Image: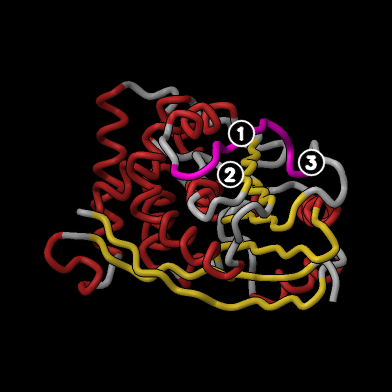
Amino acid sequence: MGSGHWQLKGSAAELYQRYLVPAITTKWAEDLVNRVQPRAEEAVLDVACGTGVVARLVARTRATVTGLDLNEGMLAVARGVPSEGPAIEWVEGSALDLPFPADRFDVVLCQLGLQFFPDQGRALQEMRRVLRQSGRAALSVYSPIGRTPGANAFVVALDEVLGPDASRIKRGEHSFANPRQLEALLEEAGFRAVDVQTVTQTIAFPSVLDYVRFQLLATPMTVLLTDRTEPERQAIISSVASRATALSAPKMLDGGGFIFPQEAYVAVASHDD
């Protein structure tokens, strides 16, 4: 991720890979990669790669893949996860100052990372700089949190339990107000043939408690529990889950699980017309 972001500890990054990648990010990664159809021997960059779900999917196409992230803990986990295809190069670095020459990649991808960058325009300019003239890019960002009812119930519950600003980090994931906002940023960065679609995935967790537990233990929201004792952590998780359950529509809780639509804006663009 770009500079100024939270660093996940190794244990949190491992939990993220083990639980949140299969439940959430793999769905979005498959959609993103399908939109650009990487080809064998193309050079592909995955910006804000996290634990590498997008990079590993691309590697299956026999493309040459580089995954970049600012977070050492995430990269350490990424290096330890087996992948198919050519070896992936994992690079620690900032999206705001990509450590690559111009015209280096055929494809640049950025899944659910742009919303966190402190200078989104600069990050997009850097992505375009490292793209070849015939290159293409694909990015995704979450839509407003009210469009994802499970996350919305969670942040309301979190603020009720821990106080009005507790959900700031989670709400920050959903900072894009509409598709046009993403389209305009890409166009201002010089991208052409920009196409932004609103996409919905169905997210399923075994229970509300599981969803809340991993949001608070496997994401940057771990900072909310840092100075708490273990009994206090468990009490907070239980309280937030109880309130989130009460705030959720009955159909989201069918069979004791936690199932809800998650919405994002997904963009594809090219370096030139």
Indicate the amino acid at tag 3.
Leu
Q: Which residue is mark 3?
A: 98
Indicate the amino acid at tag 1.
Trp
Q: Which residue is mark 2?
A: 49
Residue 127: numbered disc: none
Q: Local crowd at mark 1 within 10 Å, few (<14), some, or many (≥20)?
A: many
Mark 2 lies on a secondary structure that is loop
Q: Nearer the viewer, residue 58 or 91?
A: 58
Look at the image and give the residue range highlighted in magenta: 84-96
Locate residue 114 relative to residue 75 in the image: left or right: right
Residue 174 lies in what quarter of the image?
bottom right
Q: Earlier in the sequence, mark 1 or mark 2?
A: 2
Relative vertical location of residue 263 with respect to residue 6 in this rendering, above or below: below
Q: Residue at x 64, y 52 (%)?
A: 41
Q: Local crowd at mark 3 within 10 Å, few (<14), some, or many (≥20)?
A: some
Q: Residue at x 82, y 58 (%)?
A: 132
Q: Residue at x 60, y 32 (%)?
A: 71
Q: Which residue is mark 1?
A: 90
Do the residues under discs 1 and 2 have CB atoms within 8 angstroms? yes
Indicate the amino acid at tag 2.
Cys
Q: Earlier in the sequence, mark 3 or mark 1?
A: 1
Point out residue 108 in the picture as x, y percentages from the top left corner: 69, 55
Point out residue 251 in the picture as x, y percentages from the top left corner: 22, 74
| Residue 183, magenta (yes or no) | no
